[in-house]
Image (spheres, coloured by chain):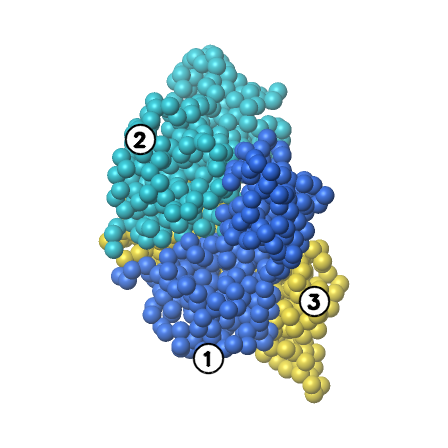
Chain colours: A blue, B yellow, C cyan
Amino acid sequence: MKPRGFVTLITDFGLGDWYAGTLNGAILSIAPHACIIEVTHSIPRGDVIGAAIALRSSYRYFPAGTVHMIVVDPGVGSARKILYAERDGHRFIAPDNGILPLALGTGAMKGSRFLENAKLWRERVSHTFHGRDIMAPVVAHLLNGVSPARLGPTCRNFVTRSFPRPRDFSARSAAGEVLYVDAFGNLITNIEEDSPITKGGGEITVRIRGKGIKGVSSSYESVPRGELLAIWGSSGFLEIAINGGSAAKRLRAGRGSGVDLERMRSRGKENERR
Amino acid sequence: MKPRGFVTLITDFGLGDWYAGTLNGAILSIAPHACIIEVTHSIPRGDVIGAAIALRSSYRYFPAGTVHMIVVDPGVGSARKILYAERDGHRFIAPDNGILPLALGTGAMKGSRFLENAKLWRERVSHTFHGRDIMAPVVAHLLNGVSPARLGPTCRNFVTRSFPRPRDFSARSAAGEVLYVDAFGNLITNIEEDSPITKGGGEITVRIRGKGIKGVSSSYESVPRGELLAIWGSSGFLEIAINGGSAAKRLRAGRGSGVDLERMRSRGKENERR
Amino acid sequence: MKPRGFVTLITDFGLGDWYAGTLNGAILSIAPHACIIEVTHSIPRGDVIGAAIALRSSYRYFPAGTVHMIVVDPGVGSARKILYAERDGHRFIAPDNGILPLALGTGAMKGSRFLENAKLWRERVSHTFHGRDIMAPVVAHLLNGVSPARLGPTCRNFVTRSFPRPRDFSARSAAGEVLYVDAFGNLITNIEEDSPITKGGGEITVRIRGKGIKGVSSSYESVPRGELLAIWGSSGFLEIAINGGSAAKRLRAGRGSGVDLERMRSRGKENERR
């Protein structure tokens, strides 16, 4: 038996039906050595941005060579294409609706191809389930060693999207926004840990929905239970959280809510708790 | 190490407790080479019909030889038996409550046996968890090569059930009903894609809950966002959906809601979008 | 390729984000032969007792040698330590917040160590995701054969907790309480099947929230649909259930609700249905 081939799945199928399970079968029928990891099937229906954030935050933790398959596909059955791309030794298949450029960065995508070689697909393709009938078989053939060159023609004219970037981005201030609300109610922003503002001295103040948060904490428990904090989260972005609660509920904040940072001039004591 | 043996799980355990996970352990303790795919644990509690539809719609996408185990078992601990059967090279184990005849068709079931050989079970069998204590060990022994003949005696007197069939089923009309509502709110009916009514010319009109839908679409996006459509779904049945919404909510429809089809005489332009 | 190494996961991450999936990647990147079973990711946020019950009820059904990893960790990023322990050939890693002593019994824990050898961790450890950055790599190294002695120093001063034990515990009576409510609404108590009260003759009466239940049933269907029953559950504890319903909702009972047992003197007919 071959060594394992790794596949991750990100979909908006939910877990109430057989759709996610069937993807596994469609892959294993062709590549019985596949090791399939279900990153999440709970992306809100059709939420391309949510899927991209899940992918961007997870893919690099898997072994190189992993094929990441994303099925958030409101255009299934229409003329939309399906895209293959590579980055840093990882391989990706997703509908051509902006997920891969969002997650990987358009400039960092390599070897982009549209899936057009129907010989690698299920013989009969349904109108509504290209994940099962096109994407899963192609993933399996890749695991079996089929060259990406056989999937279809190289392409540059795929749909591109990008996340909103922070405005006013200096060593003293930044104006960002919330990109994602996780199941804990943590607000993940678009302000990265290696931004200019993190380099200077003096305390950072974070403002969101009229509230001010002084300093960036190093753990949820570094503030009293029930209080707001800002923290550099596990995806490398600034997050707004509540120790033991939901910042999204408390602040009535969600994707797009503005988040402003300001760095005070240092006057002796460094109050930041990094 | 042996090549992998495939197992699928369909249960009504939900994901909030350790029950589904424990089934995995009970199988792997006996058959460490098992590859277990959790098709769904979210069947509504005790919903034999829902479990049968999930099984029927998923099993054929797995490799031949797969053992499919279904634990929707309101009669656990009572005198109800547990059934083994085969179809098309797939193997199935489920409580004898009609799930397998519903999913596979009574006539197509082969090699049916009741599980009676307690030597293949956990030594101590609980009152409430035969999935863990009887079914999982038997699945594992099958993966290890134990012959089905050792499970128990052949049987014909298992519980039989069948799905409601469409009435008035001709090339001109059909009167069916909704069998299943998926997590997207799509209404899966009992009208199959290879029914007589799909063969003729002229446009099909679908009626449900007082609404009429003209034609059968080939993608969700072939109608404007928010509008109703009919489409041949991925399980081979006619589905009623809303582009970007929930048909179940909009129509207040559910299992058992009537769905009528009528084929108009063709007058020139074929309006069906298949 | 090595034989499989088994890992189970119990977390409070939920399934809506990429956190649970990322744990898989972090393990497989170091130990590609890992076989990871997700027991549950639906522990209520920060619920140490719920996590301990899930672990206690599930771990012994997995193969010996399995590494069980529990990430319910409200103190992540603070000074709390992470604990390794063994019991009965199983291995465990969890935050030092009482989960392991609760689930395994402090006296039965062997080889306890604090995770302190950062060479076995991810090079850059985040503030908020020690499951991914510390625990998962250590699990993977254990699967690869690294000796527990390399994880960190042995310890005895870990946080200990224990479940409430039944009071007034004799052959005639017991006063216990509800430990856990499962997704079916079954109330799992702290009264064990091999308690003194189960040894005597005569019928047991169970009292909870002002209701009396006569006898212990052997199946849910041994009482009429919709009626209360008591049953020895699959985890070895007395459970209060409703045939086809939720005892938690009906009784408005939850963790901590009192459950009293009384054994009547036997007068001829043994009414218990074991």
Indicate the amino acid at tag 1: Pro
Q: Are marks 2 and 3 in contact (CB under 8 Å)?
A: no
Residue positioned 26% across, 50% down in the render: C3
Dot 1: chain letter: A
Residue of label 2: C153
Indicate the amino acid at tag 3: Arg
Q: Out of B151 and C21, give the one closest to the viewer.
A: C21
Q: Is residue B17 above or below residue A75?
A: above
Q: Which mark is residue A153?
A: 1
Q: Out of B75 and C4, give the one closest to the viewer.
A: C4
Q: Which is in the foreground here, disc 1 or disc 2? A: 2
Residue of label 3: B225
Label 2 residue SS = loop
- Please indicate, yes or no, whether residue B6 appears anywhere in the rendered image: yes
Residue positioned 50% across, 27% down in the render: C179
Density class for disc 2 (Cα within 10 Å; few <14, some 14-19, many ≥20) is some
Residue positioned 58% across, 56% down in the render: A50
Label 3 residue SS = loop
Q: Is residue B241 above or below residue A219?
A: below
Same chain for the residues under marks 1 and 3 in the image: no
x then y, percent, for residue A160: 57, 70
x then y, percent, for residue B100: 45, 54
